[in-house]
Image (tube, grey):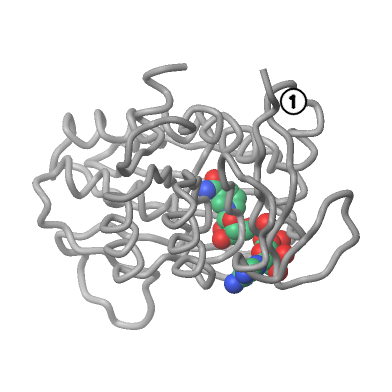
Amino acid sequence: MRMLNVLVCGVCGKMGGNVCDILRENKKMRVVCGVDKRRKILPFPVYSDFTEVKEDIDVVIDFSSPAVLKEELEWAITKDVPVVLAPTGYSAEDLGYIERRSEHIAIFKTANFSLGINLLLKLVRKASETLGDSFDAEIVEKHHRMKTDAPSGTALMLADCIKEACGGTKKYVFGREGRTGARGNEIGVHSVRGGTIVGEHEVIFAGEDEIITLSHCALSKKIFADGAVKAAEWIIGKPSGLYGMDDLTENL
Ligand SMILES: NC(=O)c1ccc[n+]([C@@H]2O[C@H](COP(=O)([O-])OP(=O)(O)OC[C@H]3O[C@@H](n4cnc5c(N)ncnc54)[C@H](O)[C@@H]3O)[C@@H](O)[C@H]2O)c1
């Protein structure tokens, strides 16, 4: 069987590098080129945009930024190539665009490729359904000093999960300052930035005289690259549509 050709978008970045490291050992897939605004000498061509790509590509793994989204998906639709989207910080408009474009190609998108976080989401859903409004939910996320968006995409996924499980009426409060008054029907979301923290998420359910805390700590970025590579292998040959971690974990 021939090796499957992968294009890594954001190939000169930290996560792009992790994906390349994992694929170097892979028996079925290999990186044949990258797209990145930065320059770096790599053992394959790195293009500054998708229009320059010459290779036949089986799947794109994107760990760049939301800025490349439109150029990338228009190119992928013309070439009929599935895309794995890992960047965080997409706007509501971007998310609508991704959904519309997924009518034409298979797109896999998640703000967190770790299996542990996806288990945490399931536990948080169960806890929220069980506790309802009798406990106050607060989310604390911690990341390295270079992270450019806040709150993290994962913190938003956790907030959405709690909100949905509690009937959809809770508002999000991002950090608190000044005379805020008593807590309302809300989910607090708090972002810590510092040093080289890979990624920590804590969901606190605070009730009368008791507290339940569910948390996840990523010790290395490799777990995300590994999940994205699994998603890339899985999505090749899938019909058009928008896929996520539930689709992948069902089949692992
Ligand atoms: N979904 C997940 O599980 C997960 C895990 C880790 C990181 N991320 C996200 O992945 C993204 C990259 O993270 P990182 O730590 O590797 O960042 P990084 O800054 O180290 O790398 C990003 C790379 O993308 C390139 N890039 C940015 N905009 C571009 C554009 N318009 N066109 C082409 N290249 C462009 C940059 O030049 C850089 O080389 C971030 O959005 C981060 O939040 C997602």
Number of numbered callouts drawn: 1
Q: Residue at x 64, y 40 (%)?
A: 225
Pointer 1 local density, CA inside 10 Å: few below 14, some 14–19, many at least 20: few
* Quarter residue 21 falls in: top right
Q: Where residue 138 sits in the image (x, y, percent)?
A: 34, 52
The type of residue carrying mark 1 is: Asn
Evaluate whether residue 77 shows in this view. Answer: yes
In the picture provided, is 151 more to the left or to the right than 38? left
Q: Nearer the viewer, residue 170 or 208?
A: 170
Camera-side residue of 224 and 234: 234
The residue wearing badge 1 is 26
Residue occupying image coordinates x 83% and y 51% = 44
Image quadrant holding the N terminus, namely top right
Query: Which residue shows up at 70% across the image and 27% down it?
Result: 3
**Is residue 139 shown left or right of residue 4?**
left
Q: Quadrant of ligand 1?
A: bottom right
| Helix, strand or loop for disc 1 | loop
Decide which of 60, 122 is in the foreground and name it. Answer: 60
Q: Residue furthest bottom?
A: 178
**For residue 229, above or below residue 146:** above
Q: Name the spot of residue 233 as percent of width and height, x first.
A: 55, 29
Q: Position of residue 130 (x, y in %)?
A: 17, 29
State the image quarter where residue 166 is shown. Answer: top left
